[in-house]
Amino acid sequence: MSTPYPHILEVTSNITLRAKAIKLTAPAIGGLALMFIGLAIFSNGSWYEGIIGISLLVFLYNTRDIGNHFNVSYFKDTSLVIHESLESFAPLNRWLVANDSKEITSEHYDELELLVKDVRIPYLDEKLKQVLSYRKGILTYYDFANLVFMYETFMRLQQHKKELKQSFKDRRKNRR
């Protein structure tokens, strides 16, 4: 299956894989953090073991909001959380976006332009203009990822609304 947005698909799949890896390894990271802190406190461990444990706890604290965007499970595919409106879409966690402060490539600009033309959403057009004016015409990978996931949320929200309408119509038919 060919997609008109291969670079967008690559970025979103990498973010989804990072979210899954971070979320699924969080219990192990927490255990390691407590082990290092316990070694530093209760045994002959040195101060750097305590620092390693504390830094792992800080990492867990900084990545705690991944569940706001992704439903991660050991047994199911990782899926994007559908927000009720685009205004309630919180920014992605910076740990999920590789090279978050670098400018995107020209291919990414082209695909985003094509996406904006294909899907006309005034709110997201305004967001894009706002980001470009704030960054003085430069779009970073972090901004790019947030905009793309907002577009995906909008598309899934529209699909979800259509499915709800269809299910209500089916219920009415079954009652008669």
Image (spheres, grey):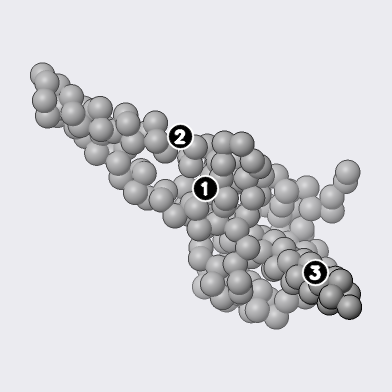
Task: Name which residue type carries label 3.
Answer: Ser
Task: Name which residue type carries label 2.
Answer: Thr
* x, y percent for residue 105: 67, 52
Q: Is residue 122 above or below residue 28?
A: below
- Residue identifier under label 1: 96
First reached walking from the N terminus: tag 2 or tag 3:
2
* x, y percent for residue 126: 64, 79
- Residue identifier under label 3: 167
Helix, strand or loop status at disc 3: helix
* x, y percent for residue 124: 66, 74
Inter-mark Cα distance, 2 to 3: 38 Å
First reached walking from the N terminus: tag 1 or tag 2:
2
Task: Name which residue type carries label 1.
Answer: Leu
The quarter holding residue 139 reads: bottom right
- Quadrant, the C terminus: bottom right
Residue contact between numbered discs 1 and 3, judged by CB atoms under 8 Å: no
Whether residue 151 is visible to the viewer of this picture, yes or no, is no
Helix, strand or loop status at disc 2: helix
* x, y percent for residue 25: 46, 34
- Quadrant, the N terminus: top right
Inter-mark Cα distance, 1 to 3: 36 Å
Q: Is residue 39 above or below residue 149?
A: above
Please tell me which residue is depicted at 70% across the width and 68% down the height of the picture. 157
Q: Locate residue 10 relative to residue 142 in the image: left or right.
A: right
Which numbered marker is on residue 25?
A: 2
Tally the numbered discs.
3
1 vs 3, front mark = 3
Please tell me which residue is depicted at 78% across the width and 47% down the height of the picture. 6
Inter-mark Cα distance, 1 to 2: 14 Å
